[in-house]
Amino acid sequence: MFRAMNYFPVSSSILSASHLNSFLQENYHLSSNTTCHLIKAGINHSYLLEDGDKKYVFRVYSLNWRNHDEISEEIRLLSFLSDNNIPVSSAIEDKNGNFIQQLPAPEGIRLGVLFTWAEGEKSISFSLETHFKMGEMMAQIHKNTINFKLERVEYTPQVLLTDPFDTIKKFLPAETEEMIFMDSAKRNLLEELGKIDMSILRHGAVHLDIWFDNLHINKENKITVFDFDFCGNGWLSLDIAYYLLQLYAIETDENIHAAKLESFIKGYESITEISKEEKLAIPILSVSLYFFYLGVQCQRFENFSNVFVNETYLKRYIAVRIKKYFDYLKVK
């Protein structure tokens, strides 16, 4: 079979930046001086395009990661937020009015979208003022996305905890100390979620990945959010839970962490209240998101180097990240 082919089939590829540049110049309103280079590889690949003083990002989705309808829903959410004056990186139409490109990669048809550039730069450690503004921005997003329905994934306990755990089990033996902990933690988290009347929590479209790597801050401290690849339907407190998870991982000094956490919450509640029930759910959802994202790493193993997604990495990740955070939050 393979002898008749000119190439051996692949499961994942990186598209040539120079050839992609020619394709984008032909299909978008870009000049012949536009440059293109890969800036991030992973589940999706991101390319930076520079045309004079204008910048854009072209995202190429991995095969069988997001389908056309799911990407269309992501774009619909971005347009909705932009129309409501939320600073986000928006999708750009090509010359024919299409947002989504079909790219015949070696592994199959991959989809791509050109996005506006988010003004500013990334910063790992935010000031108290910036955390307050992040709280304000997230609350503003939630005021718009409450009851907003996407034709995408519903982030249920099954999706956040049960399914990821079953995926992780394929990479780490069940009898290991780390997986015994994960099994116990999963059951505890599901039990605690069951004690909360989740039906009264605010629900709508969530980003699920708001952290320093997915936002830019300019000199005027204006924040622009991007990368809505994980957007879906769920409790709005999931976004708060994920932000707090990342804050704990980044700010190791206990006093600094506490001050920045307080500033973020104050910023959020200056716009809208976080209910008592949501405050009960947030620690549980926060640890659950560790399960979810570790499950994604295992699920998309071919998009990550096995230097990272192997038994040693998983044991360390569970011990240093998940168990430590679980113990910090005192989830019983």
Image: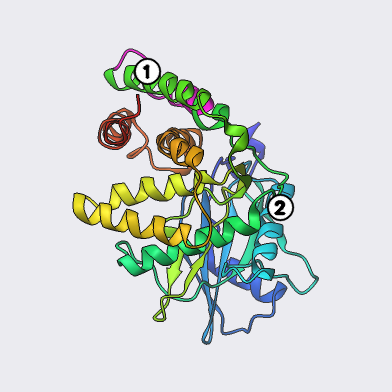
Is residue 253 in view? no
Q: Residue 223, how many percent across, how many down? A: 47, 70
Q: Amino acid at mark 1?
A: Ser
Q: Which residue is mark 1?
A: 184
Q: Earlier in the sequence, mark 2 or mark 1?
A: 2
Residue closest to the eye, 34 or 217:
217
Mark 2, secondary structure of its residue: helix
Residue closest to the eye, 217 or 134:
134
Residue 153 in the image: above or below residue 114: above
The magenta stretch is: 162-176
Quadrant of the frame with the C terminus: top left
Q: Amino acid at mark 2?
A: Glu
Residue 24 in the image: above or below residue 163: below
Q: Which mark is residue 89?
A: none
Mark 1, secondary structure of its residue: helix
Q: Residue 231 vs residue 152: left or right?
A: left
Q: Which residue is mark 2?
A: 73
Residue closest to the eye, 65 or 33:
65
Residue at (42%, 51%) from the top-left corner? Answer: 243
Q: Residue 101, how many percent across, how many down? A: 70, 60
Residue 315 in the image: above or below residue 239: above
Q: Residue 315, how many percent across, how many down? A: 29, 28
Q: State the CA–CA distance, disc 2 to disc 1.
A: 36 Å
